[in-house]
Amino acid sequence: AAEESINYIIDSPLTPRHLPDIQTSAEFQKELNNEVQKALLFLLGSLGEIASELSELSEEFITLSANVQLQLSSNELLEQIHALRMKFIDRVGSKLLLLLEFVELNVGAITKIVK
């Protein structure tokens, strides 16, 4: 969905070279503002999802910390710590990287449109 909206912005017929008069320019500005708002709403929604994931993983970390106090065997504890780290990387890290790419693409698209 993110790539579709980015492609829409980039491939939009509403580019500066297609705007001969002031009225069309105002319409272009309105359309551009709408697209920027869509991107920001997507970004905020994604950040909310990431915050939820972090909250869930933090609860798992608290449970794991309690298990440390119960003195689980060291191998079992190391396996659980490793599994939790991998969850952080898989669930949060990869989403953050995709979100960063989305932001970079949108900034690039908007820069091209504005020029």
Image (cartoon, helix red, strand yellow):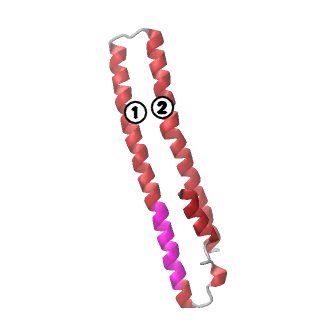
Mark 1 or mark 2, which has the lower sequence index? 1
The picture places residue 82, in percent across and down from the top left corner, at 50, 22
Question: Looking at the image, is 74 positioned above or below residue 87?
Answer: above
The picture places residue 95, in percent across and down from the top left corner, at 51, 44
Question: Looking at the image, is 93 positioned above or below residue 98?
Answer: above
Q: Which residue is mark 1?
A: 57
Seen from the viewer's position, the closer of residues 63 and 3 is 3
For the residues labelled 1 and 2, the Cα–Cα distance comes to 8 Å
Question: Looking at the image, is 33 positioned above or below residue 50?
Answer: below
Q: Which mark is residue 91?
A: none
Residue 110: tell me if it is visible: no
Where are the magenta residues, as a range? 26-40
Q: Which residue is mark 2?
A: 87
Q: Are there few (<14), some (14-19), or many (20+) residues within 10 Å of tag 1?
A: some
**Amino acid residing under circle 1:** Leu
Q: Residue at x 60, y 58 (%)?
A: 105
Question: Looking at the image, is 97 positioned above or below residue 13?
Answer: above
Q: Residue at x 64, y 70 (%)?
A: 11
Q: Is residue 65 left or right of residue 28?
A: left
Q: Is residue 86 left or right of residue 17?
A: left
Q: Residue at x 42, y 54 (%)?
A: 45
Q: Is residue 39 left or right of residue 8?
A: left
Q: Residue at x 37, y 32 (%)?
A: 58
The picture places residue 2, in percent across and down from the top left corner, at 54, 57
Provide the secondary structure element on which disc 1 rests: helix
Residue 80: tell me if it is visible: yes
**Amino acid residing under circle 2:** Lys
Residue 34 magenta-highlighted:
yes
